[in-house]
Amino acid sequence: MHEVTLRMKDIQKSFSGIKALKNINFELRKGEVHALLGENGAGKSTLIKILSGIYQADGGSIEIDGKTISIHNPLDAIKQGIAVIHQELILADNMSIAENIFMGRERCNKFGFIDFKAAEREVQERLDLLGIDLKAATVISKLSTPQKQVVEIVKALTYHAKIVIMDEPTASLSNKEIEMLFSIIEQLKEQHISIIYISHRMEEIFHISDRVTVIRDGEYVDTLKTKDTDADELVRLMVGRQISDYYSHTKRKLDQVVLEAEGICTPDKLKDVTIKLHKGEILGLSGLVGAGRTELARAIFGIDRIESGVIKINGRPAAIQSPGDAIKNGIVLIPESRKEEGLILGNTVGFNITITVLEEFIKFIHVKQAREQEIIHTFFSKLSIKASSPRQAVGLLSGGNQQKAVVAKWLATRPDIIIMDEPTRGIDVGAKAEIYALMDELAKQGTSIIMISSELPEVLGMSDRIYVMNNGRIATCLDGAEATQENIMSYAAGVKND
Ligand SMILES: Nc1ncnc2c1ncn2[C@@H]1O[C@H](COP(=O)(O)OP(=O)(O)OP(=O)(O)O)[C@@H](O)[C@H]1O
Ligand SMILES: [Mg+2]
């Protein structure tokens, strides 16, 4: 018999009359990793928010260790042993790891003073136990994102969490960091802690989870043992159909060079980077996290200052000193971090999609309304953005649908050159295929695309040629039969070098 830690039954939730969750059933066993899978907007985060006390369910029940409980606020959830590792980490930057972990419940020594030393000792012990090379006294601002996640996990442990929820925890992690997270998860399992794991990456689900529950459009579909299923079955359950043509790639002829970066150096990262981009080409940019791919994108787009080197557009040197200059030269950048750079969360989806084309509207002021509606409409259907209406605030969309809105916003400018930084991060498999098809269509029409991606199958499936970066340099350019996972990895890791 398996011991059940958590049972959610018939959970329902509506937002202004629209049903986000219809009848979700979810059972979590002691010490298991249970993946929650579903398309963008299926209701995964909403279910988690109900469990963690951020939202209140409209109906249904929650049992913990066989007892029906009610969770009215985040504190109730913590008291029940439920901890969430949030994707947007909420730690105080100028305080230490230990201070962050014990914030709001500072321990006092026998003289009534806050006992920082005791807090630090406990945190250090836990870090050591997990095999994490961090000091409890280190200030948060010095930590990387994965290290901050570790702090959140240690925090959960000090609260004696029985259930740890991870909502897309690996979205911004490198492979090595993902391995570290997985080894921590294994240790949590050994301590009989149960984990709810949300991710759009199939390989992770197969690697780490014991069971998978699939939800679709706010409805419970099925719960399966991970080892008894495969990616095809899960995708079918998720999207309700088979996806056959996953990558769209029309063979293209590359002749006209539209963009050249020659000998680009930046103060912090790039060393003598030279690349060529052809008209109608999809160019993959591969490499490990920190190799300089995002920096190259930022340099071309005029965000970061170039120390030496030139950028040529259609053979002529272009003075790109700001994103405004880049946009005038027909270049757009779809950034990696949608929250920080991509969207104005408080504004409507429609506004966010059309904000980059506002200048164009002003020129044709008399058709403004109609044109705005047309753009919104086109991209809503092309990328099947799931929102109750274009008037819904973007911040209320599911994570993946926010990402689609960022993509839509920049495509609306009809650029000649698009740089996409991790375009499909956080996007479900069905919607990925839609974005790939759109990229292929744009390339056919002559748009050139630079795609930065950490997912090798995606780079291989979509690119005409692939530049691999290592340590701020271009390590090689691969195409045809040379473009293999092994080759990319060897150049990315610096094992091979041209
Ligand atoms: N506060 C809110 N107000 C209105 N609608 C909301 C709110 N929160 C979520 N929704 C809607 O509920 C639905 C489910 O969203 P949810 O964030 O749970 O999806 P998800 O499965 O986590 O998707 P993703 O994979 O994209 O993160 C979406 O249609 C979303 O727009
Ligand atoms: Mg979500």
Image (cartoon, rainbow, N blue to C red):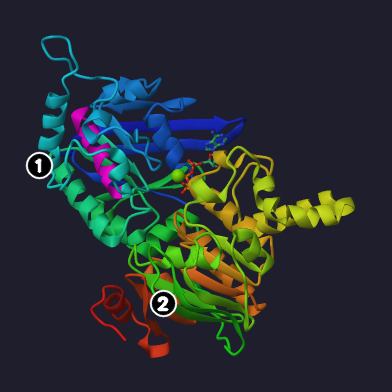
Q: Which of these two is toward me, 268 or 458?
A: 268
Q: Amino acid at mark 1?
A: Leu
Identify the mark nearer the N-term, 2 or 1. 1
Q: Which residue is mark 2?
A: 272
What span is in magenta? 146-161
Q: Is residue 362 left or right of residue 333?
A: right
The yes-or-no answer for disc 2 within 8 Å of ligand 1 is no
The image's mark for residue 490 is none
State yes or no: residue 160 in magenta.
yes
Query: Who's the residue at 44% across and 64% down the image?
Result: 295
Residue linked to disc 1:
129
- Vertical relation: 135 (above or below) 203: above
Measured as percent of width and height from the top left, residue 172 is found at 37, 54
Specify few, some or many for label 1: CA neighbours under 10 Å numbering under 14, 14-19, or 20 or more: few
The x, y position of residue 373, in whole percent, is: 77, 51
Q: Most prominent secondary structure in the magenta stretch?
A: helix
